[in-house]
Amino acid sequence: MPRVSSTIDGYLWCDTCRRSYRHGETEDGHCPVCHTDTRPIGKYQAIVRGLMSNELATPEIYTKHRQIIRMIWTRNGMGEQYYRALGPDLSYNRFEARVTELLCRGAREGWVRFVMPAAPLTDEYAYKVEFDDETRFIDELEREFAADVQTTPNT
Ligand SMILES: [Zn+2]
């Protein structure tokens, strides 16, 4: 017999990707594409928002490119290492998404480079992240996550 529950029989909206998912399509409420938190919305809202954002929809090639960037910087447990070192007050998935966004900005601004082989290779070390200035990355990380510390209420 199929499991029926009104709490999970809804739609979840991802603000980053501007699209909705059924609960089963998410990863514990996280967007399967960008891994940020999704939020529940009603069925009609999901349909209307979906129609409105159709023109604004993120092209698949953009999300795939972002996924590759995420895979490169988190490789070999590096993502978890940064997470443990910084100890930010947010989930690992959210952390990973924020750092990926930060690195995408770094690449746009030119202080981070993602190096990829000309053709796909099975040697994952051919895919790497390079920093012109590693202290810039550390400063940016601190700035990104310092805000979380400041918003923690004093008791
Ligand atoms: Zn998303």
Image (cartoon, rainbow, N blue to C red):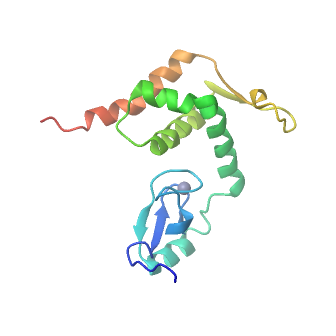
The image quadrant that residue 71 belongs to is top right
Which residue is at a point 32% across and 36% down the rendered structure image? 148
Which residue is at a point 78% across and 28% down the rendered structure image? 126
Residue at the far left: name it.
Answer: 155
Which residue is at a point 42% across and 32% down the rendered structure image? 144
> Is residue 140 visible in the rendered structure shown here?
yes
Q: Viewer-proximal residue, 68 or 50? A: 68
Q: Quadrant of ligand 1?
A: bottom right
Q: Quadrant of the C terminus?
A: top left
Q: Going by the image, does 116 lie left or right of 97?
A: right
- Position of residue 112 measured from the top left corner of the image (x, y, whole percent): 63, 26
Q: Going by the image, does 11 lie left or right of 153?
A: right
Residue at the far right: name it.
Answer: 119
Q: Viewer-proximal residue, 149 or 143? A: 149
- Position of residue 27 measured from the top left corner of the image (x, y, whole percent): 52, 57
Which residue is at a point 46% across and 81% down the rendered structure image? 44
Figure check: 124 above or below 15: above
Residue at the far front: name it.
Answer: 1
